[in-house]
Image (cartoon, rainbow, N blue to C red):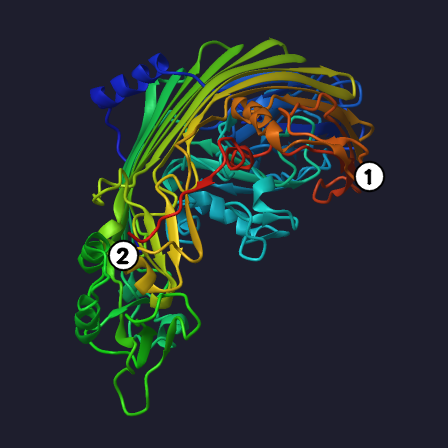
Amino acid sequence: MTRAIFTFRTLVLVITLLSLVTFGVNRSFGQAISGNMVGTVVDSSGAAVANAEVTATNVATGLAITNRTNNTGEYRFENLPIGNYKFTVKANGFRTTTEVAEVVLNRTGTVNVTIAPGAATETVEVSGEAPTVDTTTAQLESSYDSRLSQDLGITSAGGVGAGVLNLSLLSPGVTNSSALGMGMGPSVGGQRPRDNNFTVEGVDNNLKTVTGSLITIPNDAVENFTLLTNQFNAEFGHSSGGQFNTNIKSGTNSFHGSLYEYFRNRNLNAVDNFWVLQGLKENPRLDNNRYGATLGGPIIKNKLFFFTNFEREPVGLTGASGLPVVTPTAAGLAAIATDTQINATNFSIFKQYLTTAPTPNGTCIQYDQKARPGEPGQVGAFEAPANGGCAKGSIEVGTIIVSAPAFQNYTNYVQSVDFNLSEKDQIRGRYVYNDLHQLDTTASLPAFYLIEPSKFRLFTIAEYHTFTPAVLNELRIGFNRFANTLPAGNFPYPGLDAFPNILLNDLGGVNIGPNSSAPSATIQNFYGAVNNITWTRGAHSFKFGGEYRQYISPQNFTQRSRGDYEYNSTQMFLEDFTPDIIGERSTGSTMYYGNQKAVYWFANDTWRFNQHLTLNLGVRYEYTTQPLGTARQALNNLSSQPQIIVPGVNEPLLFTAPTSSKNNWAPRIGLAYSPGSSGNTSIRAGFGMAYDVLYDNIGILGVPPRSAPLLTSRV
């Protein structure tokens, strides 16, 4: 792996224009995208210093926010943009003292300051970073900064795609999903991956169809990634599993850029034992070359900043079928050709897509022209006689290796703009663009591999306003779009309007046809707005927020839309008999609409009971409408059984449109205790409730019209 970085001081007009243009695109919102800092100011005797002036200054941008300590010497800063800060304390009769600390995404850090008697013109600056253990909340979290994102978040299950989300596997209680299966992403606290919630800059980033994350932020554009694993505050919801939050870099007062390349291929890795056991001496193809550039800096010093990242990631893989492909040898194909009952159309399709096996594999399949297929006798593959060849009524087959090119090509672009409008107003804008073109290798045969395009877009703009040092407001609006098409191609099948799926079990279960889930398409447009108010009064920090979400999501996936025809015997297919396993085709392609709305609100009180103990008391309410398409479940009322009483429910079994729960209250109670005065230890406990949002595949698989069998018969 190689990575080159350079720093320079040049302002490029094109980059400036790109930065300004982003204000004219669509908009976005989210959950918390900042951090907090609290602390206590005491004198050298340990007595609290009231009414001391505390100024938090962002080292990179010069943004300065001032607050004062209360009667117990405590101060609190809410919604600070993440980054390194200088916390400067001034008080009459004391030396000016400065501590340096980092504000981390979704975390409340602690910086306790001890000031010494002296003139205010005398300054004391503490070198190094102050500890930032979250001692004021029961929330459990793991945070990873930009350096870890660049150096560690480079792989995923398939080598690409998840990016910094892989860093979550370094957190306690997090494991990969192989044991639990359901959904995409890791398992947090033993829960299914489908219970996770993903946000980027606070914008909802969840795939509605089968769950998982959508847009991917290039590693070199990530400022901070945080995973909340347990007992999160009332501000967070939507799901009961992990809360995955990613923040994007912003520009600073100095110009900084980078050129980078991450290179991985099969020759850099030791040969996996999985391949050795299959007789291979080298790894299959894996060529991953991720390269890009970043540039960030000021447009107006201390006021307007930009950051830009462009990245390409072409990945070359080896396409391989999940099952061995068994086909007749030349001799076996010649024997089939003598069948007087063969269907010419089916035989031509068979020869066109199934390559003849070069050598026999020692097995035979039944093919008896004198017996009706499916009659008592040996069906499927069986060993050839010891003297070689195949007995009468069977044909010789062999195994072919399916190896075809496969690739995943990513194009990523990130643009961020930060504007310090005044001492009381800050604006943040973000735009993310992902394009993915990959070869769909789900089909058994390379002839049916097709390009699958996916497009991702996200925009977010947030405005932070300070009414007073004790009252803050954050307003965010947002947009997130995902569009995916899984094509079935335009393969002709004489006499049919679409190429079906033809499964032949005696040939290893090979499927002659495209991906069995094709054609399908998904569009997901997300719009939303959120407003949060923070009010600090005495020992209490109150936070109230409301959020509105709207999804517009037409989806097209119908099982067996092209027809599924599964045979135990290849002879049955070639002679055009009714399939002996399954022969079904749906009555048409159904469009499912996952359109739905959601309203969330919460109230939370962080009560700093004393220097050591903090109580978090909150409540959250969530109302999510049913997807528009699930209302069509009422069309299944022909299956209703009014006379049947369901055990334990005592209601008739009726098929009606589902309704949404209006009682999703989620209380959150927690405490954090920090013994001593160092702020290095926090003991946490709490209780909370959360509600998962159901994914669309539950509804789309049951939407009428139901699949109806279409039987074929021998002519």
Residue 63 horizontal/vertical position (percent): 49, 19
The x and y percentages for residue 320 are 31, 60
The residue at which mark 1 appears reads as 648
The image quadrant of residue 531 is top right
- Mark 2 residue crowding within 10 angstroms, few (<14) / some (14–19) / many (20+): many
Mark 2 vs mark 1, foreground winner is 1
Q: Is residue 187 left or right of residue 52?
A: left
> Is 119 located above or below residue 566 in the figure?
above
Q: Residue flagged by tag 1: what amino acid is it?
A: Gly
Residue 379 sits above or below residue 198 on the image: below
Tally of numbered tags: 2
**Element assignment for label 1:** loop
Amino acid at pointer 2: Leu
Q: Which residue is mark 2?
A: 445
Residue plotted at (51% across, 16% down): 476
Q: At 20% from the left edge and 44% from the top edge, which residue is drawn?
A: 494
Residue 459 rendering spot, x and y as whole percentages: 41, 22
Locate the N terminus by quadrant: bottom left
Please report whichever mark, 2 or 1, sits nearer to the chain's N-terminal start: 2
Report whether residue 106 is seen.
Answer: yes
Q: Would residue 115 be seen by someone viewing this image from the given angle?
A: no
Estimate how packed mark 1 is, as few (under 14), some (14 to 19) or many (20 or more) residues with alpha carbons within 10 Å.
few
Helix, strand or loop at label 2? It is loop
What label does residue 99 carry, if any? Answer: none
